[in-house]
Image: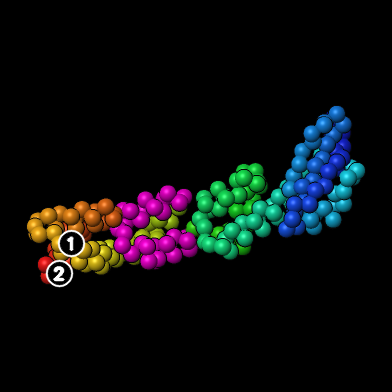
């Protein structure tokens, strides 16, 4: 069997920023299907009202246009701030289909603009992460969609004790008003544990910090 009847462009609406909504219909189809297209594709393929296309030709044009738009949108979002692949996928979901997003993300990987390893390294080296232990950082990275092997690599060279000592010393100064030594020790240790530091590391950091802070 040959292809179904041809498609006809029945609407062509500019959406701004070089984007056009193109609607194609078949005979007997009152609604048709509308896809966002880059204006370059509209001009190149003459997607004006009345233009007829085979379903195969339309799908190729639509697919290529969606790839260009999704990639372009992804670059715009990444220019505003670094994002993980999961974050970027979620940001594109409202305007593009999962297959189109997959292709755009693959393209951004190829171009070097989307890199979960680099994002994880920056996150772990950032100021916010300095007061967190491996356990909490591991949970935060996983929550952003980072693969376990990438998480392990990002945390591999982290000096857990040094981070715990710095965090403990800052926190200990705020506990000077607590009169009971055992209570100060418990509060500081529990605080470090909530920040994701291992129990033995939290204990060592607690003892060091309290010993250096005059009450």
Q: Can you give x and y, in whole percent of width and height, for residue 8 in the image?
A: 87, 40
Give the mark count: 2
Query: Mainly helix, strand or loop, the magenta region?
Result: helix
Image: magenta residue range: 117-145
Q: Can you give x and y, in whole percent of width and height, for residue 177 in the image?
A: 15, 62
Q: Residue at position x 21%, y 59% from top? A: 201
Q: Assign a secondary structure to mark 1.
A: helix
- In the displayed image of the protein, which residue is found farthest to the front? 177
Q: Is residue 125 magenta?
A: yes
- In the displayed image of the protein, which residue is found farthest to the right? 50
Q: Can you tell which quarter of the image residue 74 is in?
A: bottom right
Q: Residue at position x 55%, y 53% from top? A: 88
Q: Nearer the viewer, residue 57 or 183?
A: 183
Side of 77 relative to 46 (left or right): left
Side of 214 relative to 55 (left or right): left
Dot label at residue 175? 1
Dot label at residue 213? 2
Q: Quadrant of the C terminus?
A: bottom left
Q: Quadrant of the N terminus?
A: top right
Residue 179 visible to the viewer: yes
Asked if marks 2 and 1 touch (Cβ < 8 Å), the reply is yes
């Amino acid at each position: 069997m040959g292809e179904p009847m041809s498609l006809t462009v029945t609407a062509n609406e500019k959406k701004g920023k070089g984007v056009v909504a193109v609607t194609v219909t078949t005979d007997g189809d009152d609604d048709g299907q509308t896809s966002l297209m880059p204006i370059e594709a509209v001009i190149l393929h003459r997607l004006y009202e009345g233009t007829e296309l085979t379903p195969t030709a339309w799908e190729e044009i639509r697919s290529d246009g969606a790839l260009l738009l999704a990639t372009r949108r992804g670059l715009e979002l990444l220019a505003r701030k670094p994002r993980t692949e999961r974050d970027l996928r979620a940001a594109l979901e409202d305007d593009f289909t999962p297959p189109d997003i997959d292709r755009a993300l693959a393209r951004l990987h190829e171009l070097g603009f989307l890199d979960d390893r680099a994002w994880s390294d920056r996150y772990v080296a950032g100021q916010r992460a300095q007061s967190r232990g491996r356990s909490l950082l591991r949970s935060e990275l996983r929550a952003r969609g980072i693969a376990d092997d990438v998480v392990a690599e990002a945390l591999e060279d982290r000096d857990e004790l040094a981070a715990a000592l710095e965090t403990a010393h800052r926190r200990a100064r705020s506990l000077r008003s607590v009169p009971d030594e055992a209570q100060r020790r418990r509060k500081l240790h529990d605080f470090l544990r909530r920040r994701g530091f291992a129990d033995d590391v939290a204990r060592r950091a607690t003892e060091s910090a309290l010993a250096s802070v005059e009450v």
